[in-house]
Image (cartoon, grey):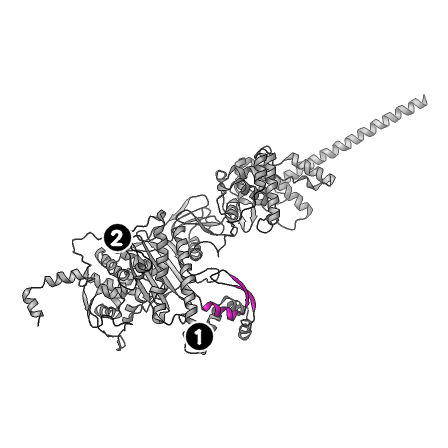
Amino acid sequence: MAEKKSKSSNKGGKKGGVKVYLIVLWSLFVIFVAGIFFMFYGIVNEWFGPMPTFEELENPKTNLATEIISADGKLLGTYYIENRSNVSYDELPSDLVNALISIEDIRFYEHSGIDRRALFRVAFGVATGDSDKGGGSTLTQQLAKNLFPRGENLSTIQLVIRKLQEWVTATRLEYNYSKDEIIAMYLNTVFYGHNSFGIKKASETFFGKEPIDLNVEEAALLAGVVNAPTKFSPRRNPDNALNRRNLVLKRMCENNCLSAHDCDSLSQLPIDLSHFGVLDHNSGQATYFREFLRGEMTDWAKTHYKPDGTPYNIYRDGLRIYTTIDSRMQQYAEEAVREHLSLDLQPAFYRHWKNNKMAPFALDSREDVEKVMTLSMKRSERYRVMRNAKVPYDSIVAEFHKPVPMTIFSWDGPIDTVLTPWDSIYYYKFFLQSALMSVDVKTGHVKAYVGGNDYRFFKYDHVMQAKRQVGSTFKPFLYSLAMQEGEYTPCTMVPNISYSIQTPDGKFWEPKDSGKEKFGEEVTLRWALAHSNNRISAYLMKRFGPQAVIQMARRMGVTSEIPAVPSICLGVCDISLYEMVGAMNTFANKGIYVKPIFITKIEDKNGNVIETFTAEKTEALDDVTAYKMIELMKGVVYEGTGIRLRSKYHLRYPIAGKTGTTQNQSDGWFMGITPDLVTGVWTGAEDRSVHFRTISLGQGSNMALPIWALYMQKVYADPTLNISTGDFEKPLTDTALEFDCDKYEEEQNAAVKPEEAEEDEF
């Protein structure tokens, strides 16, 4: 009996122990659940730190690049802190969505922000030491982390809390957004490497296309890159990238998004990076224009405000700037500058100065050369930095004579070399620069803008920043005044003799001409302008005076300082290419000056138009005077200094123009006018002491005109531009306009009365 009692009591003891054990387990479970509840309650109520507000979830803040868009819809460049632009789900190809879900979150459409199966898989992996089971974060959790970053150097406790905060944020995102919107938001926030934030910039950088145009293998690559942008970069680690892409293709096959046959076929393809290009501030199209526009937009943003009252920021707010630049014409302009300078003019310049000890300076002594070089040293960024750092002058000079590694410009591509900074300055002195601006006649829209040879190496903009002597391209202002006064026509005869003009200081100024053609004879004004005759310009200047000519230039948009001296008729004043093109456009636009503009409209990140732009217009000339000037300037092309447009470049369409060559051939100009486009070209060196020493090489018809010709050849050959090849429209007037000067002279002689003719015989 005692034995039975003992067994019975043991059983009771065991049952009691089990009961206590279960109570402890349940207690621990309740405590755990309560702790989890308490933890999440505290997270939601921000006990452990701030959480994204409802407004922030509705409008998540990311740094969006401002896009610069051409008139024909091409992306010219961006201003950014992060090179990012958003796209909507409708702009994403299905292959990209399938690739992303297959490799990152296979149950994306099944969970509500947190994938429990994935969490159990991760927990099992940790418990078993098998870390290859994959991560547990869903796309929504990753989006939460991208939108609201964790920060750095978190402790383990902080990291756990931050992870739980991301869970809460993920569930809120799922509540506020559709699955499609979350996919688009995720792809917009991901970093792909190579300075590309978001799928749109990644597509442009890796493949030179919009996301919607990605094919399957390209979509698979971009879906795979996001896991580790450096490790899977096709540029830096091509083998890793190929393996990763093929893994994505395999997962797509397993997820029934791709057939086995297609998977095998696509896996054999190499990664095509033929269109790879990192778009930064120094590369791409229209770099000088984009840099000029940056300054304009920065000033604009200071006085324009977002709905919250803060000023716009071009680096963060995702604006879209619609410009007037046509990407096709911009390409033709850049090609024309490069072609003439690299293949023709620069080689001729080297030959011209070969074996000359003073090269490339047309100066009298080595001391003068030293002064120019020293001034250039003091203008350099390297010098500025050292001076700001309080480095003594002698030490700076010594640094400029120490060899250092550097990359220098050449027309065949950048060269990595070792040079002293002083020698690099001397090296760059040899390069001739050129600038081009092309404007639509009626709208004033700037269609092409080339500020120099290569913005990476030459930062100075010769369209807007530079002001150089304009030479004979100034003469049309003087001739316009003569035509407008009524007593002169293109066929008016003037003695081609020397003329002297008394200057304000009592001296006499008398210009010379390089040639003696028709000297002492009577010539027409058309002939005089066509051959850029200086004596006839002096005759007209003596007739009208400097102030009247300056007023004419002002009405035609020239704002630069012009000295009131007789020699301005030869273009001794400094004017920008921008001003000159705008002024010459007045002739083609029937006497209406249209201030050239660069932007048509600006939108915010949501596509709302903030501001639109139209050109300012003022009447500068009457339409008859403008047409007379067109006919005068046609003579430059048909028989004068611009005749090689027809003889060499075979441009037979109606063209008016004017060449310009300044003192010592330091600057060469050509202004070309057609019914649809007015385009100006300047060519010269950085220093005015660097130039050709002969007029045959240094004149505008050799330095600048060929660039205009090459550009217009390409423009005329492109039917998509719809550039007119017809003639200029005549004004609606009853005035008889005769521009055949031989015929005009015959008519004038026939109109002479018999008694007058008899008197003329004596």
Cα–Cα span, label 1 and label 2? 48 Å
Residue 677 is situated, as x and y percent measured from the top left of the image, at 32, 54
Q: What stretch is highlighted in magenta?
A: 400-429
Q: What residue type is labelled 1?
A: Asn
Q: Residues within 10 Å of mark 1 (few under 14, many from 20)?
A: few
Is residue 388 within the magenta segment?
Answer: no
Helix, strand or loop status at disc 1: loop
Residue that badge 2 annotates: 727
122 or 72: nearer the viewer: 72
Tell me which corner region of the image, top left, top right, bottom left or bottom right, holds residue 505: bottom left
Against 40, residue 592 (above or below) is below
Q: What residue type is labelled 2?
A: Asp
Q: Which of 163 and 673 is in front in this view?
A: 673
Q: Can see residue 429? A: yes
Verify CB contact (< 8 Å) between mark 1 and mark 2: no
The disc at residue 702 is: none
Q: In which quarter of the image is residue 657?
A: bottom left
Query: Is 405 colored magenta in this rendering?
Result: yes
Q: Name the residue under label 1.
A: 356
On the question of residue 565 being in view, the answer is: no
What residue occupies the far left of the structure in this picture? 755
Q: Residue at x 47, y 72 (%)?
A: 373
Q: Residue, x 63% and y 38% (percent of image)?
A: 41
- Against 357, residue 675 (above or below) is above
> What percent of the width, then of the height, locates residue 707?
37, 60
Q: Position of residue 269 (x, y in %)?
A: 56, 43
Q: Which of marks 1 and 2 is nearer the N terminus?
A: 1
Label 2 environment density (alpha carbons within 10 Å; few <14, some 14–19, many ≥20): few
User: Mark 2: which secondary structure?
Assistant: loop
